[in-house]
Image (spheres, rainbow, N blue to C red):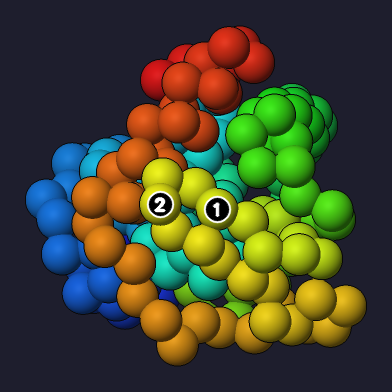
Amino acid sequence: PPQKTPACRRALKGIRAVYNTPMTEPTCACFRNDAFELARLEYWRIFLHPVQDYLGRCFIALIRHEEDFLALTGAERDDLWEAARRLRAAQAALFQPDHYNYQVLGNSLRHVHMHFTPRYSSPREFAGVTIEDEHWGTWPYPATVGRPQEWLQAVIAALGQRLSQEGASP
């Protein structure tokens, strides 16, 4: 089994609490929730963020464990750009965001991952739910509203299918 650092163990506990779904064993214990996985590339997995305060909010996580963004290999870096490009194309086709925020922080989870947050200047509707970007033009603040599980599954299905069309493996 993969070695779990203290940071991985803390993150895994938090992720289990957020997702509340079974997980399978990946190369690293930090990101391994199959229920929210949209696609996989050679070095990265794309997940729908369970908190959909911004329609289509996702994160792209490195499959192996690494804590330093600048320690990525050239192949990992290129694959991250490809994952982000494919996700952006899928988002543009489905939701027509007006802007995108890309964030690599690592403050509470010490594992290289990128937050991918589409931003909207006007409300968007998807599968009967309307979402408004209440912080348009500023930092993307965390949500205060949860979304129904059935709706999250509809977003996962739509984005996963679109990412497959963009060439990412389901």
Disc 2, disc 1: CB below 8 Å? yes
Q: How many numbered dots are placed on residues in this image? A: 2
Crowd around label 1: few <14 · some 14–19 · many ≥20 (10 Å):
few
**Residue positioned 45% across, 31% down in the render:** 158
As rendered, which of 33 and 73 lies closer to the eye? 33
Kindly identify which residue carries mark 1: 125
Q: In the image, which disc is placed on residue 28?
A: none
As rendered, which of 140 and 127 lies closer to the eye? 127
CA gap, disc 2 and disc 1: 6 Å
Residue 81 location, x and y as percent? 78, 35
Residue 128 location, x and y as percent? 40, 52
Q: Is label 1 in a helix, a strand or a loop? A: strand
Q: In the image, which disc is placed on residue 128?
A: 2
Q: Please determine whether, in this image, residue 13 is positioned above or below residue 64.
A: below
Observer able to see residue 70: no
Q: Amino acid at mark 2?
A: Gly
